[in-house]
Amino acid sequence: MLSYLIRRVLMLVPVFLAVSVVIFLILHFIPGDPVDNLLKVGSPPEARAEMMARYGLDRPLPVQYGVWLGKVVQGDLGTAIVARRPVADLIVQALPHSLRLGGLALLFSTVVGVGLGLVAALNRDRWPDKAIMGGVLLGSTMPSFWLGLILMLVFSVWLGWFPVSGARSASALVLPVLTIGLGGTALVARITRVAMIEAAGRDFVTLLHAKGLSPLRIQLRHVLRHALIPVVTILALRIGWILGGAVTVEVVFARPGLGTLLIKSLSQHDYPVVQACLLMLAIAVMLGTLVGDILQALMDPRVRAAME
Amino acid sequence: MTARALPAPVRALRRPMGALAGGWLLLVILMAVLAPLITPYAYDIQSLKEAYQPASSAHWLGTDEFGRDLLTRLIHGARTSLSVSGIAIFLSVLCGMVLGAAAAWFGGWFDRAVTVVVDLTWSFPEILIALILVAIIGPGTTGTMVAISVAYLAQFTRLTRAQILTLRGETFIEAARSLGASNSHILRRHLLPNALAPVLVSAMLATGDAIILEATLGFFGLGAQPPVPSWGGMMSAGSALIFKAPWIIVFPGLTVAVTVVAINLFGDALIAELDIRNRMGGRA
């Protein structure tokens, strides 16, 4: 298991390098020259050259990348152009909000999704199955920002149960978590249902039935355990997807967080902040797949055997 | 003619769910095509006296903050939203099929490079990829279109590659090769046509996701620019007025949701008719 872990973590290094190259290059694809924005109109060419040299922009691209990456690894993410503060400060402020929101949404969609998928699979092709799958389909097709606004209208404005926006109290988290969670729930419920039905057809299940175990016990203790493997894999792969949901939902509910920071800096052309936000999201995605793979290896001895 | 000889989309329409979903989709497409002929008002005529009206016999879905008829804007919005997402997915499928087929066919370093890039982008949410691309290209319909098509490129490349790799081991390909067929002949006449059905069905399903993505970009103000209506743009304007005139945002959102549900249901009917469930690349 340990050698599997080490190999799996080492596999992240080239992926991180590739992602960092892409994120670094984004700055160079964006139209407009940052140096022109910094210079006064009518500055002599020497002033421009001096500015280029000060920011290291006169050096070849690979060298610039190396310098940037070296600083990033040390936690120096540069200075925000608009806020005129270290980018790392902005990120440290925003990150806990996004992690809390994303983590709770992930928890919600896993618990509710597995539950609904289980009920649907146990009642295959009967009305509970059809009702759950219909509801799940509807839930996954609503744009998340729209769902968020409608929930806000009903529960905050009409019923007055929750604050409209912001992040001052814990109850302000309920609607954003629900908004992101419902989309994830749909995905988890669908995968759980299919995996349960598929696992129930396996030979070992027939054997358990032949041994005379109670059907419900077989479903819950054996089939569900088997079915959770693909659920964990796909959930881990889709961590980024949940973060993507968080981006829009944070904006809708005016919550501080990486998403709000990203959208704001995109519209202000504050590219050091954009780069940092993307880097954080990329790291979250990579850690998600890592955790998913480790969980999968813990749950499925065959995966471990194949890796060793 | 027997039922089996009919083309799959027609057969899918004969299933109850397929008929319901297909009917809605045909209606939306028809409205989008005929928009200027069937709408009672012009989409950009403002009439401030009539602003913020709820549904009435003159304005079936009410009016927006400029007194423009919402139904008219919704129908014209279908034009923008459907064409942007449709063209984006078409481009995505085209490039994805070429890339995927080439990767599967040539193998070696090219295949490895394509696979690495595809796996990398696949784990990133489409909305993030699209947001960054729009930031680079600039907002508007063209920017959104390109951004959406790149965001879905990985999906189609991956699917086509998997299809070709599976099909390549089949007996009929071996037979064609034994008969002396050339590489390019096998690829063009045997592999790609057989890989087409799952790719096209998932293209249709992806169009549903693309409609949501287009609406989200529109919501951020990055899609079609005013006064041209799009579903996302209408919701963007409506979100600020949600407490004063909720109908401005409710109807476009419902239209998006119902249309995407219809696309999914019709897609499911197609998958069942074509009997390709196990070839859809893990769609549950």
Image (cartoon, rainbow, N blue to C red):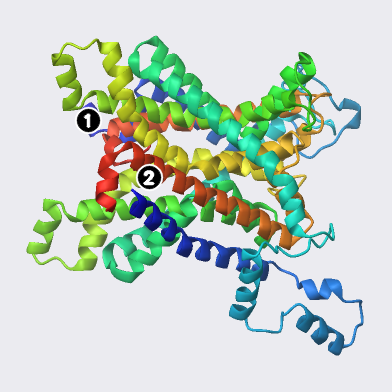
- Kindly indicate the quadrant of the structure image that contains residue B39: top right
Label 1, on which residue?
A: B4
- Please say if the residues under marks 2 and 1 sit with CB atoms less than 8 Å apart: no
Q: Residue at x 37, y 53 (%)?
A: B158
- Residue pictured at 54% horizontal, 33% vertical: A106
Give the letter of the chain under mark 1: B
Q: Quadrant of the N terminus of chain B?
A: top left
Determine which of the numbered discs, if any, sits on residue B200 in the image. 2
Residue found at x 75% / y 70%: A32
Q: Amino acid at mark 2?
A: Leu
Percent of width and height locating residue A101: 65, 35
Secondary structure under the numbered disc 1 in the rendered image: helix
Residue B12, percent from left and from top: 34, 29
> Is residue B173 placed above or below B203 in the rendered structure?
below
Q: Nearer the viewer, residue A221 or B209?
A: A221
Q: CA distance from mark 2 to mark 1?
A: 20 Å
Q: Is residue A295 left or right of residue A268?
A: left
